[in-house]
Amino acid sequence: MELIQSSWRFGLQRLQTGLAIFVLGCVLAALCGGSAIAQDEANAEPETAAAATETAATETTPAKTIDEREITGWFTEDFTWEELQQLRCTERIPKLRAANTEFNGAERILSLPEVLGIAQRGGIGVVVEVKHAPYFERIGLDLAPLVARDLRAAGWQDPGRGRLVIESFEESALHEVRDAGIEAEYVYLLEDEGAAHDLRLALGSAAPSYRKQLADLASLAERVDGISVAKSLLLDPDAPAFAAEARERGLELFTWTARPENAFLDKRFRGSGARAEYGEWRAEWRAIREAGVTGVFADHPDLAREVFSV
């Protein structure tokens, strides 16, 4: 069982304290000048104090369309790496995790090479999520060669390297990184509903839904090494019965994201307290484990260790 940490430097320091983080999660955005950074979205505003820095524009950037959604904010590609290093991270859900706001402004965004170095020094593997690849390609920032360049430079293609997983909600992005010559495990991310953005761009209304793709695991198993699904798909009795078949076909089965607060738990496992209070998270996570997953993304690796470690 792989426990996958999905937070940043403060969380990564736990690697030195013996907690069970076997695979480090990171996501990618690109910025002006062709650097790859560990950032959850192209819009940097929700996770940084961009508005409070001299490098941010006095007004927000005009709205941009990303994955068919119009978004206003400060976007990574509008910064150079030197400018972006002046921004500071903030808690993205302060209403639910008010205690974490104590650390607002203490850390900056990390580059992909920095995350890779932390993983190497900690003796763990790394998950690189390639996000919004069609959007970045449309504006002239192709993520695949950036990922390939940084992985090679950091030694993640050398003999004896740690475990390397590349994942994306867009299967085409996985193929682009593989075509760049990167040896890794390739994992396809699937949402609870809707269809993949790259398939919608290519096929329009004929694009298969995520659930329809889950019903054809034989085809997926020919193209990827694993799937990573929203945990609701594992907990929904009406969802396709795919977990056992995935394992039978040799696919890794990851899920996301294990969080203990009532706000994030399936309704069966919510407690009577407020949204920010912990519910019956152990019961939910046991149900996820019993589904046969091989990897779990978690914000609280110390808690996840209680349920998922073997």
Image (cartoon, helix red, strand yellow):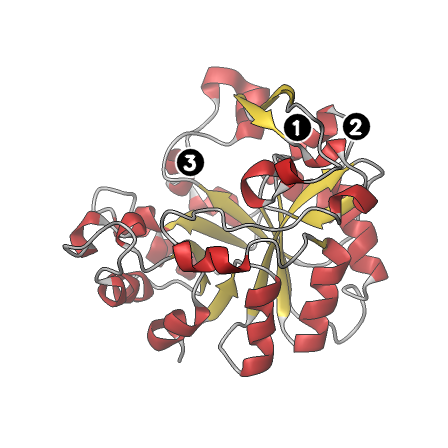
Q: Secondary structure at mark 3?
A: helix
Please indicate whether residue 282 sits to the left or right of residue 21 in the image.
Answer: left
Name the residue beneath numbered marker 2.
140
Name the residue beneath numbered marker 1.
135
Q: Amino acid at mark 3?
A: Tyr
Quadrant where the image shows the C terminus: bottom left
Q: Is residue 251 visible?
A: no
Q: Is residue 297 above or below residue 75?
A: below
Q: Is residue 141 visible?
A: yes
User: Upstream in the sequence, badge 1 or badge 3?
Assistant: 1
- Label 3: how many Cα within 10 Å (few below 14, some 14–19, many 20+): some
Q: Secondary structure at mark 1?
A: helix
Q: Position of residue 199 (x, y in %)?
A: 55, 27
Q: CA distance from mark 1 to mark 2?
A: 9 Å
Name the residue beneath numbered marker 3.
210
Task: Locate residue 195: give its quadrant.
Answer: top left
Q: Position of residue 293 (x, y in %)?
A: 39, 62
Residue sitting at x 30%, y 53%: 276
Number of numbered discs visible in the structure rendering: 3
User: Upstream in the sequence, badge 1 or badge 2?
Assistant: 1
Residue sitting at x 54%, y 39%: 46
Residue sitting at x 53%, y 46%: 188
Q: CA distance from mark 3 to mark 2?
A: 28 Å
Please indicate whether residue 83 sits to the left or right of residue 173 in the image.
Answer: right
Residue nearest the viewer, comparing 133 with 56: 56
